[in-house]
Image: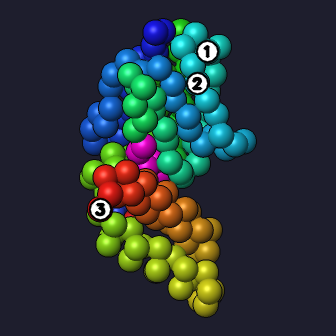
Amino acid sequence: MATLRLEIVTAERTVFADDVSEVVAWGVEGQLGILPHHAPLMTMLQPGDLLIKKDDEEHYLAISGGFLEVRPDKVIILADACERAEEIDVERAEAARHRAEEILKTRPPEMDTAAAEAALRRSLARIKVAERRRRKKGI
Ligand code: ATP
């Protein structure tokens, strides 16, 4: 099976580096599937879930935005933050979601609602990825 090299890095660490068969990410213009031999491309990513297909298995990660670049030899994702499903602290994500929803509901003048919207999207992506793993494991 043809594969592509995928590297996901943040300022702090390499989250993922392996050969995979497909990557599906949320670009700013919508969902984007990258298969081996995809044409060179550069796009910004929005917060969301990232699907990696490898050896007939599907892995989901939460990504908080960043850049995706398809190069001839590899796909690189420079992420603001990125967590594997098993790394996600669901209580923390629920608390972040609650804080963001409160700001968006009450709209206090001193608070940045665009930042709250972004925080809400990050928290929802984390919750979605963690819940999917929980359902898959039957817990
Ligand atoms: P919070 O308000 O809970 O800090 P945030 O969305 O503002 O959430 P980020 O700024 O996106 O957090 O991330 C800061 C760091 O914390 C990153 O390393 C990120 O991977 C990690 N992180 C954030 N939320 C979680 C979570 N729910 N579970 C595990 N790691 C998280």
Q: Position of residue 103 (x, y in %)?
A: 55, 83
Residue at 62% x, 86% y is 105
Residue tagged 1? 38
Q: Is residue 18 left or right of residue 36?
A: left
Label 2: few (<14), some or many (≥20) within 10 Å? some
Quadrant containing ligand 1 reads bottom left
Magenta stretch: give its range. Answer: 60-64
> Which is more N-terminal, label 3 or label 1?
1
Q: Position of residue 71 (x, y in %)?
A: 53, 15
Secondary structure, mark 2, is strand
Q: Is residue 13 left or right of residue 113?
A: left
Mark 1 and mark 2 in contact? Answer it, CB < 8 Å: yes
Which numbered dot is residue 139?
A: 3
Task: Specify the amino acid type for callout 3.
Answer: Ile
Q: Quadrant of residue 33?
A: top right
Q: Is residue 24 left or right of residue 62?
A: right
Residues at marks 3 and 2, CA–CA distance in whole angstroms: 31 Å
